[in-house]
Image: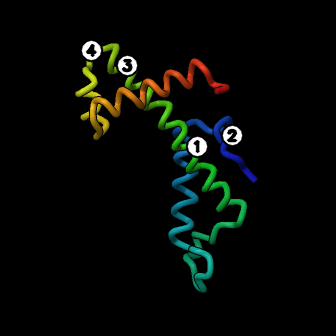
Amino acid sequence: MVTPDEAERRFTLLTAAARFDELRRRDALAPPGVEDPDPQAAPLTRDEALELLALGEVLIRKAGYGRQLTVRTARATGASWSQIGAALGTSKQSAWETHLRWMEEQENPDE
């Protein structure tokens, strides 16, 4: 069984997204219990279903990390917290607090 930690080490964001999409499509085309699935899309095995779950977690982790790095870049290029909040679909306060928590977690990963 693939765990999120193992998959995170094995996959880049792009390769994780591609594998996730491949498994998700197969799952949509041939869900368990379908009598006559598309011959090109066999239902997922248990291990593949668990891999799909783990890959979803990996995508969330990698996208979240990339988001925070981009917030840092936006600030370095002169973007205001109001502009960053608007780009994220949230308030400036929420954007700032989320980024501050992320920075604190990077400084103190064991806490």
Q: Secondary structure at mark 2?
A: helix
Q: Earlier in the sequence, mark 2 or mark 4?
A: 2
Residue type indicated by callout 4 = Gly
Closer-to-camera residue (66/43): 66
Q: Quadrant of residue 76?
A: top left
Residue type indicated by callout 2 = Asp
Between marks 2 and 4, how big is the CA–CA gap? 35 Å
Q: Earlier in the sequence, mark 3 or mark 4?
A: 3
Give the class, few, some or many, for how many residues have Cα within 10 Å of label 4's Cα (few <14, many ≥20): few
Q: Secondary structure at mark 3?
A: helix
Vertical placement of residue 33 versus 80, above or below: below
Residue type indicated by callout 3 = Thr
Between marks 3 and 2, how big is the CA–CA gap? 26 Å
Q: Quadrant of residue 23?
A: bottom right
Residue at numbered disc 3: 73
Residue at numbered disc 4: 78
Vertical placement of residue 18 versus 83, above or below: below
Residue 5 is marked as: 2
Residue 31 is marked as: none
88 sits to left or right of 102: left
